[in-house]
Amino acid sequence: MRFSKLPRSMRQFGTHVLAIILGVVFTVGTLQVSPSQAEPAPSPIVNSVTNQDSRQLVAQRQSPATTAIGNSSFVTAAVNRVGNAVVRIDTERTVVSRRIPDPFFDDPFFRRFFGDSLPQQMPSQQQQRGLGSGFIIDKSGLILTNAHVVDKADRVTVRLKDGRTIEGKVQGVDEVTDLAVVKINAGGDLPVATLGSSSNVQVGDWAIAVGNPLGLDNTVTLGIVSTLRRTSRDVGIGNKRLEFIQTDAAINPGNSGGPLLNAQGEVIGINTAIRGDAMGIGFAIPIDRAKSIASQLQRGEKVAHPFIGIGMEDLTPELAKQINANPNNPIRIPEINGILVARVVPNSPAANAGIRVGDVVVQVDGQRINNGEQLLNIVEQSRIGQTLQLKVQRGNQTQQLSIRTAQLQDAS
């Protein structure tokens, strides 16, 4: 039966029913796809995603770096662990100079007539004072610091964090590694800094410098280890034999000799140098190097530093071509990789072995040499009096030379 043939009342009733059904369907569909202002509980899938995001957010908020910066608790703990062992070192030395009152009186003409009655050269004394830092490494009163802090000091005074001031005695100094040991008699147990290991240090690790910069006692600065194995030549102190820890923890005059700590409060280095042409860059001697030398210094022993006596430059074929292009250059340099001998120290092992300026060292004891640091390390690790076999390129000829190492301080 067709819908059009139904009575009018029936058709109207059916139309109303259909409208109600469509309204209900439309309302239910809207509830399923439209967001509610009441925010009903999400489905289990939504729950799992939301919980996962929340956990990630909490993890980010509670990461070690964020926590460390937020409350500095690890810095406080590190400083509390070592701070009492950090000392201030004040030094005094007398510098004597001779001055002439007036050059007029040195004229031989006037000396001839007045003789010894004329004023003579008059000695002048001047007191020089220095300031540095150090840290106690033994309860008996042994303090590790830099050699340049106590260099030529007539008097060394150590000030402890508790306010006591005690006379110190320099037990030993090694200028090549810029390390020194000072002894104090404090009459009892002293706080001792915990020595860590610099071999475990990585770029990006926390670095805490403690010391007395510019006379501001008990100063702490925080940074990171910005690089490792920075050479003495890079730092600008080529007369040292060191590879430094570089840090952006603020280091200033007076920090020298103080400890560089890791996040656990262990000493990983000794704050030593800054560069005048840079900001935010400081350098520390790795503590592992200091450990191997401190025991010798406290006994007053001389630290062995073998040397052969050459000044050198890293050489590449490109650099050699530039040198040879100079028409005033009296020597033709081999266009190879190696170590160019730029200077030979008189009466040194190299001079006695026949090394010449312009030679290029390419091998030592059969080991290929590409840069000066390799050669320095080989020589430093040798023994005093040990014979090293050097292969050098001299012009178009190859030479085999035997060099017997000597103590560095014996160089003239």
Image (cartoon, grey):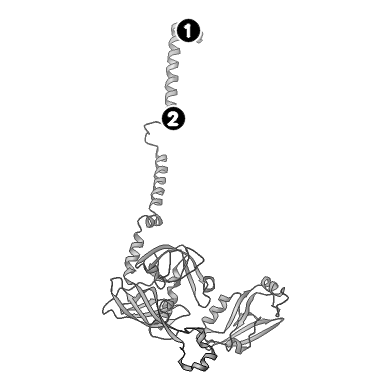
Depth check, mark 2 against mark 1: the one in front is 2
Q: Are marks 2 and 1 in contact (CB under 8 Å)?
A: no
Q: Is residue 380 above or below residue 201?
A: below
- Name the residue furthest right: 327
Q: In screen coordinates, is 110 left or right of 331?
A: left
Quadrant of the drawing holding the C terminus? bottom right
Whether residue 1 is visible here, answered yes or no, is: no
Residue beneath the point at 45% across and 76% down: 289
Amino acid at dot 2? Ser
Is 99 placed above or below 236 here?
below
> Label 1 is placed on what type of residue?
Leu
Quarter residue 287 falls in: bottom left
Residue 81 in the image: above or below residue 389: above
Q: CA distance from mark 2 to mark 1?
A: 39 Å
> In x, y percent, where is residue 244?
48, 71
Residue tagged 2:
34
Residue 209, compared with residue 40, is above or below; it is below
Q: Is residue 291 left or right of residue 187?
A: right
- At 43% across and 64% down in the image, what residue appears? 250
Name the element at disc 2: loop
In front here: 276 or 281? 276
Q: Identify the residue at horizontal 40%, vertical 48% (top origin).
A: 57
Rendered image quadrant of residue 334: bottom right
Q: Which residue is mark 1?
A: 6
First in residue order: circle 2 vs circle 1: 1
Res. 113 in view: yes
Q: Position of residue 89 (x, y in %)?
A: 36, 75
The residue nearer to you, when weighing 385 against 274, is 274
- Splitting the image into 4 quarters, where does residue 42 fall? top left
Q: Position of residue 378 (x, y in %)?
A: 55, 80
Going by the picture, which residue comes out furthest to the front? 113
